[in-house]
Image: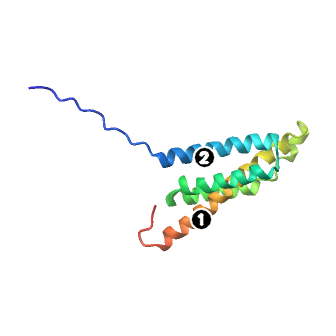
């Protein structure tokens, strides 16, 4: 009798999750580099908002919405204040951290709004859990 070898089932690639992760990673890189090199640049803000919208649609499910929104609220709250004291250590260091956090907040704000809307829809629709 011939032995049958079982092949491991092929794992399907979750393209939506992969693209969402890459968009998120690109947004983080842009927020850090933009915060250090070009704070307050309108074009960077526009790109971050568009990336944030994509993150909201691609990455966040209804089950993940509440923890994500709590993190986004904390980030947005701190986004522009809190690190000026670090300017005493090195001139402009605290301002640079504030600028990076401000950009990161602008990345996550649209994702938080979309997550909030999706969470509300999941509560309103029967069987609407994502």
Query: Which class describes the residues within 10 Å of circle 2: few (<14), some (14-19), or many (20+)?
Result: many
Foreground residue among 7 and 74:
7
Q: Earlier in the sequence, mark 1 or mark 2?
A: 2
Could you say whether the residue bearing mark 2 is in a helix, strand or loop? Answer: helix
Foreground residue among 36 and 84:
36
Left or right of residue 54, residue 40 in this image: right
Q: Residue furthest left?
A: 1
The quadrant in which residue 21 appears is: top right
17 up-or-down from 63: above or below = above
Q: Which residue corresponds to mark 1?
A: 116
The quadrant in which residue 106 appears is: bottom right
Left or right of residue 7, residue 32 in this image: right
115 up-or-down from 87: above or below = below
Q: Residue at x 56, y 59 (%)?
A: 65
Q: Residue at x 63, y 59 (%)?
A: 112
**Residue 15: percent from the left, percent from the top?**
47, 46
Discs 1, 2 touching: Cβ within 8 Å: no
Q: Residue at x 24, y 32 (%)?
A: 6
**Residue 38: percent from the left, percent from the top?**
82, 44
Residue 27 bears which disc, if any? none
| Cα separation between marks 1 and 2 | 20 Å
Q: Nearer the viewer, mark 1 or mark 2?
A: 2
Q: Which residue corresponds to mark 2?
A: 23
């Amino acid at each position: 009798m011939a032995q049958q070898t079982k092949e491991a089932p092929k794992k399907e690639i979750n393209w939506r999750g992969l693209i969402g992760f890459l968009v998120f990673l690109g947004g983080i890189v842009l927020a850090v580099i933009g915060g250090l090199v070009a704070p307050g640049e309108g074009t960077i803000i526009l790109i971050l908002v568009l990336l944030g919208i994509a993150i909201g649609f691609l990455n966040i499910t209804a089950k993940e919405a509440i923890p994500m929104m709590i993190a986004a609220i904390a980030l947005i709250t701190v986004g522009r204040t809190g690190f000026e004291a670090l300017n005493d250590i090195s001139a402009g260091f605290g301002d640079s951290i504030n600028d990076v956090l401000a950009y990161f907040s602008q990345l996550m704000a649209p994702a938080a709004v979309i997550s909030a809307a999706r969470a509300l829809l999941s509560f309103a629709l029967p069987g609407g859990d994502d």
